[in-house]
Image: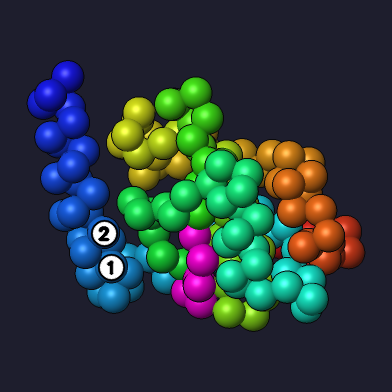
Amino acid sequence: MEQIKFFWSLAYRVWPPVIRTAVYLGFHDFRQKFLLGHLNTNYNKEDLARLLTKNGYERALISWKDPGEILSMRKVHNRIYQYHIRLFIDGEIRAHYEYTPESHPIDHVMEAHFVPETEYFRDILAGYLIVPSEVNYKK
């Protein structure tokens, strides 16, 4: 167990700069799937972060940084999966449910289990989210 703790403490220090370098070099230059909508203009990034923190979310340290992303938070579920929400500079909110990097590192990167969980996210975000029309939602 101590070896696993040591590995993840090291990974949390080393992996974020590796991800940022890969993004800088162009290995990840797109926004991930599952557009939920846009942040209601009555709220800002800090308001959204407070809401998510109150609902058990934390900063997502081991994740890609999508272009224009200004907030990335996750909530671990059953130590195997996580809910992951991103906010972008243009107010767009995207979210998905996936393996945690801690439980399935390779499957996490390969998006082996990557699903929208739209209703869950809409419930959490309630008045903070402006839902797009059905045409735009299919992005």
- Picture coordinates of residue 27, whole percent (x, y): 32, 66
The residue depicted at 69 percent of the width and 39 percent of the height is 117
Q: Amino acid at mark 1?
A: Arg
Q: Nearer the viewer, residue 137 or 43?
A: 43
Q: Secondary structure at mark 1?
A: helix
Q: Secondary structure at mark 2?
A: helix
- Picture coordinates of residue 60, whole percent (x, y): 42, 53
Q: Amino acid at mark 2?
A: Pro
Q: Quadrant of residue 102?
A: top left
The outermost residue toward the top is 1
- Picture coordinates of residue 29, whole percent (x, y): 42, 70
CA separation in Å, label 2 and label 1: 6 Å
The residue depicted at 49 percent of the width and 35 percent of the height is 76
Observer able to see residue 135? no
Observer able to see residue 67? yes
- Tell me the residue that label 1 is attached to: 20
The outermost residue toward the right is 133
Q: Is residue 31 magenta?
A: no
Task: Confirm or deny contact between disc 2 and disc 1 (CB under 8 A).
Answer: yes
Position of 100 compared to 41: left or right?
left
Position of 67 compared to 92: left or right?
left
The residue depicted at 66 percent of the width and 75 percent of the height is 44
Crowd band around label 2 with a 10 angstrom C-alpha radius: few (<14), some (14–19), many (20+): some
Q: Nearer the viewer, residue 55 or 74?
A: 55
Q: Decide: is 132 above or below 116.
A: below
- Picture coordinates of residue 47, whole percent (x, y): 65, 67
What predominant SS class does the magenta segment belong to?
strand
- Tell me the residue that label 2 is attached to: 16
Question: Which residues lie in the magenta part?
Answer: 67-72
